[in-house]
Amino acid sequence: MAKTKSQKIGQSHFEQSIAQLSPSLQREMRELRKQEAKILELLSDPHKAEQYLSHPLQLLQAGGIQVPTLLKRRLQQFDPNLAQHLSRQTYALPNGQTVTARIRVRFTQGPKEG
């Protein structure tokens, strides 16, 4: 079956994004990508998506995602305080009004590879 244009674009974007990694890490990323649908389903829950920011390896393993060895080691070294750095901050404007930034991250399903 021939790939569609969007599938080719998605594939090339993924390949470009992992091109700077070592060959072994590239293999593991391709292996993990096979579970993309399962990961996206897991991250569609806002609570779990937020939990992913603090403990990505634990969340993936609890969701039944098979994490390859090198990626597992890298995720074990992940900074659990990342969610703290991404917390909402309130800014005071000169007129006394306050503004709170709201950042929303959405995990969406990319093009299917065949």
Image: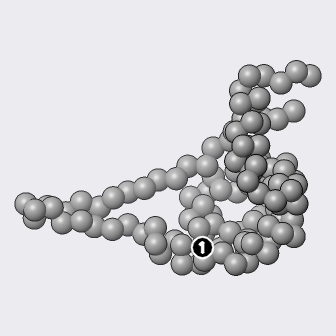
Residue 105: image location, x then y, percent: 52, 53
In the rendered view, would you say 34 is above or below 72? above
Can the viewer see residue 39 in this picture?
Answer: yes
Residue 32 placement, left or right of 10:
right
- Total tally of numbered discs in the picture: 1
Residue located at (72% from left, 72% from top): 75
- Give whichever of 37, 12 is nearer the camera: 12
User: Can see residue 62?
Assistant: no
Give the residue displayed 79% in from the left and 75% down from the top: 73
* Nearer to me, 110 or 14: 14
Give the amino acid at mark 1.
Ser
Q: Position of residue 51 (x, y in %)?
A: 60, 69
Instruction: Give 62 or 99, whichever is nearer the viewer.
Output: 99
Q: Position of residue 107 (x, y in %)?
A: 61, 49
The residue sitting at the left extreme is 95
Tell whether 4 sits left or right of 1.
left
**In the rendered image of this protein, does residue 15 appear above or below residue 69?**
above
Q: Quadrant of the C terminus?
A: top right
Crowdedness of circle 1 by 10 Å Cα count: few (<14), some, many (20+)? some
SS assignment at label 1: helix
Q: Is residue 4 above or below residue 42?
A: above
Is the image coloured rainbow, by chain, by secondary structure, or in one colour?
one colour
Residue at image point 38% right, 66% down: 88
Q: Which residue is mark 1?
A: 54
Residue positioned most to the right:
1
- Residue 13 position by quadrant: top right
Locate residue 86 relative to residue 28 in the image: left or right: left
Residue 16 placement (x, y as % from top left): 72, 43
* Quarter of the image with the N terminus in it: top right
Near-viewer residue (32 or 28): 28
Q: Could you tell me which residue is drawn at 78 percent across and 22 percent down? A: 4
